[in-house]
Amino acid sequence: MFNDVISIHDLTSEQILYLCEKAEDMKNIEKSGQRFKLSDSLKNRKLAYMFYEPSTRTKLSFDTAMNQLGGKRDGFIGIEGTSIRKSESIMDTVKMMEANHFDVIVMRNPIDGSVQWAADVANIPVINGGDGKNEHPTQSLLDIFTLYSNNGKKLDDISIGFGGDLSHGRTVKSLCIMLSYFKDVKIYWAAEDFLGIPLELIDYLESKNVTVIREKNVKDVLDKVDFYYMTRPQLERMEGISKSLVTKMLKQYKIDMDKIKNFNGKLLHPMPVNSEVEEIEKNVYFSQAQGFLEQAENGIFMRKALLHELLKDKDYVAFNSKLDYDLLHGNNKLIRKISPKIKQGLFIDNLNTGISIDHLKYGAAFEITSKLNLADKGYIAMPAHLPPDEEFLNGKSFLKTNMELISERELKLVALVSNEPTINIIKDGIVVDKFVYLLCRNENCITRDVKEDVPPKFFNDGNIKCRYCRQKYVILN
Ligand code: NCD
């Protein structure tokens, strides 16, 4: 069916519906008292969990699912006690899981796109248990299964409300994208501006014919929907914002008995509920509307279905200790015409053999000289600055050095200081190679993490997008 589960964008509506049917089968098995009916199906298979961030439900439900299918589980939650504390990279950690004969990896990591990188590195299936602010596809699958079960086993014609923190979490984003695969979906929401649905997501949903309506308050939303999806404030992703300020922002949006008194639908929440902020008041837990505990159990059915589909017909993959050369190379070098091929012009004169880095922002050349440690390495560095003029309104700078080779990591250091540098490789007074180095602009993208050393890759689906965090990239230079 598929090999990895990284992004909702990789799934089709048929696959989502198929997985809902399979999860329904798993639910029926449980509800008819046959919990271990499939306990031979993944016998001797092993699931590795790599959770760089805390988790209760996601980790446990994969654990339970694998156990009920007869498989084994091991791994880490939190990096304490692992070699990640000794700066081991994601690539090496993934390879260690494979070398230890695991059959599938579930990974959660705070960096956007990190799980796609793990999947690129691994020869076994990788499942995204949450990457940065990006996606949480298996949460959306269980959420959508909860909607499917409570909506007459279909996913068209759904009205759903969203509340809480719709900006910093990944569950809302992933669920909204998944809902956009179906017809007549109406999304209503109410939240503080700072916690609201990001504009790019609204634009995307509207481009897929989803109706998205913002209401002033929660009651207006609850009046119009069959499901209300509440979320906790994702405080760990709000740098420099105090808990008390966020609590204040959430105050009027909290779910209490008064708000739900006329609500006949289901109240959902991916959980955990923050017991200090209490975005859902305690009494509500005991109301008819409470649907989030059923939703949590649905996680087991959906993850059981997913693991079963991923592994049931696959023999184990024997460990291959050789790494694929592709992992070394990005596709982010925009080749530029080489001209003139002569030793002339400010940016190349006095340099017979070496590298000239051009189109740097004003003032960047000095910073790059020190970031690349050119002096310590014994190279000559000639940084220069051109003040603003008619051609370069903000000015620019460039750097010449007699260093002959520049590594991927060094190119990244340059691009982190000044986006889209032009690199000229010079031999015997002639420019022999010339390219612009592109680096994703999402500050939290894995490709910007120097120690992980992931070569940037882009794809074009009408827009140029980062292969890892999938954010749009506009070429400027
Ligand atoms: C997570 C949470 O809120 O911490 N909950 C969950 O997985 N059920 C969601 C997340 O990590 O994005």
Image (cartoon, rainbow, N blue to C red):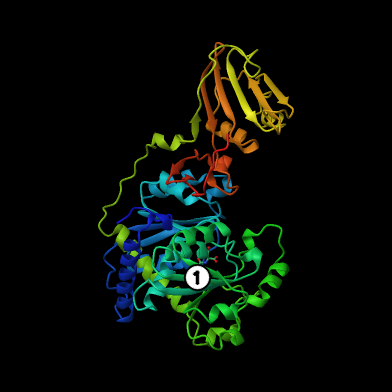
* Image coords of residue 9 (percent x, y): 42, 55
Determine which residue is flagged by label 1.
187
Nearest to the observer: residue 216 or residue 361: 216
* 168 on left or right of 23: right
Residue occupying the point 65% across, 74% down: 277
220, above or below 209, in the image? below
- What number of labels is visible? 1
247 sits left or right of 10 in the view: right
In the visual, does 161 lie left or right of 41?
right
Q: Amino acid at mark 1?
A: Ile
Question: Which quadrant would residue 329 be assigned to in this image?
Answer: top left
Q: Quarter of the image containing the N terminus? A: bottom left
Q: Farthest residue to the front: give it.
A: 390
Residue in front for this viewpoint, 174 or 370: 174
Q: Position of residue 466 (x, y in %)?
A: 49, 45
Indicate the position of residue 11 as horizontal and vertical percent values: 37, 57
The C terminus lies in quadrant: top right
Where 420 sits versus 152, above or below?
A: above
Query: Callout 1: helix, strand or loop?
Result: strand
The answer to which quarter of the image holds residue 219 is bottom right
